[in-house]
Amino acid sequence: MKNRLKVLRAERDWSQQALADRLEVSRQSVNAIETGRYDPSLPLAFRIADVFETPIEAIFLRD
Amino acid sequence: MTGTKERTTGRTARFWAGLLLGTLGAIAGLALSGAIDADTALVLMLVPVIQTIPLMRAAGRRRDGVAGGLCGKGEAQKRYTKRVALFTALYLLSFGLLTFATTESDPAFALRSVLAVLPGLAVIGIFWAVGRLIVEEQDEFIRMLVVRQSLIATGIALSAATVWGFLETADVVPHLDAYWVAVAWFLGLFVGALSNRIEYGSWGAV
């Protein structure tokens, strides 16, 4: 699954660690999601959407 | 001010790991060269056991200092590290006690049984610590890595035990004590961590 995490993060000038702190996960998790190596669970995907104040479908895209 | 900072920072994990390996090497060297006997070597082995305490503390400090560190938020992993350090120390102590008792005397069956069970219980403690880490880890990605690593380790250990068992039946290989399955499992954890690194870019938490 593709995602726009890196773009959204860059727009806010957040580091991976800053986003990880907001999501209460490890930086490794953010990196794995961002690079498409790991697809988050639905609850975590919703948390990401909440943090970016963006609809979930605007962050995660079908392959 | 500087002194306070140094007290809170302390030596690095690398320093303590080097010291621990150096101590182990020195004891092994002395024992192999015949400079000390087996009993002295066993007693001296308490030193590296004690050295694991500052090593774990330094590793914990490093994890906290690198903002998330090796992996995850760290609380579950800190508890895991403490538990593994504790059970490893108990294992080394109980194994030393068993070796000492069986080589120096001929204890009664009941005592021998109790002494023989203790190292096994300590290793079970390490298995339990891995299980608790899976339960307590709040970071789903890290939890997935630990589960994946454990499954790979289990697959390797069971496969190795099965194949070795049949080879033993056919008199192709010598007999191995059953606790080597646990050793294979721990080696499997390393393979699992390597697989995690290749597949997901992170070693995981174990």
Image: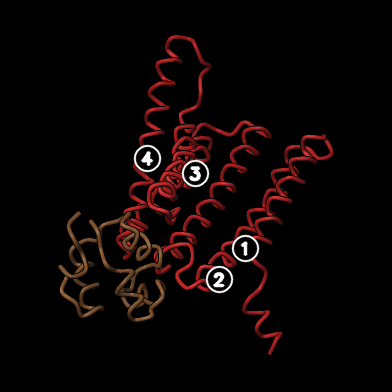
Quadrant in the rendering for residue A54: bottom left
Q: Which residue is disc 1 drawn over? A: B13
**Of callouts 4 and 2, the N-terminal one:** 2
Q: Residue at x 36, y 76 (%)?
A: A10
Q: Which residue is disc 2 drawn over? A: B61
Residue B152 bears which disc, if any? Answer: 4
Q: What whole-number distance in Å separates the C-alpha atoms at marks 4 and 2?
A: 29 Å
Cβ atoms under marks 4 and 2 closer than 8 Å: no
Query: Of the residues shown, which amino acid type is indicated by label 4?
Result: Ile
Indicate which label's residue lies in the foreground, 3 or 4. 4
Same subunit, labels 3 and 4: the answer reads: yes
Cβ atoms under marks 2 and 1 closer than 8 Å: yes
Q: Residue most toward the bottom?
A: B1
**Of callouts 2 and 1, the N-terminal one:** 1
- Figure colour of chain B: red
Q: Position of residue B137 (x, y in %)?
A: 34, 62
Cβ atoms under marks 3 and 4 closer than 8 Å: no
Q: Looking at the image, is A2 positioned above or below residue B164?
A: below
Q: Looking at the image, is B187 positioned above or below residue A23?
A: above
Check disc 1: other Cα within 10 Å, few if <14, some if 14-19, many if 20+.
Answer: some
**Of callouts 2 and 3, the N-terminal one:** 2
Check disc 4: other Cα within 10 Å, few if <14, some if 14-19, many if 20+.
Answer: some
The subunit carrying tag 4 is: B
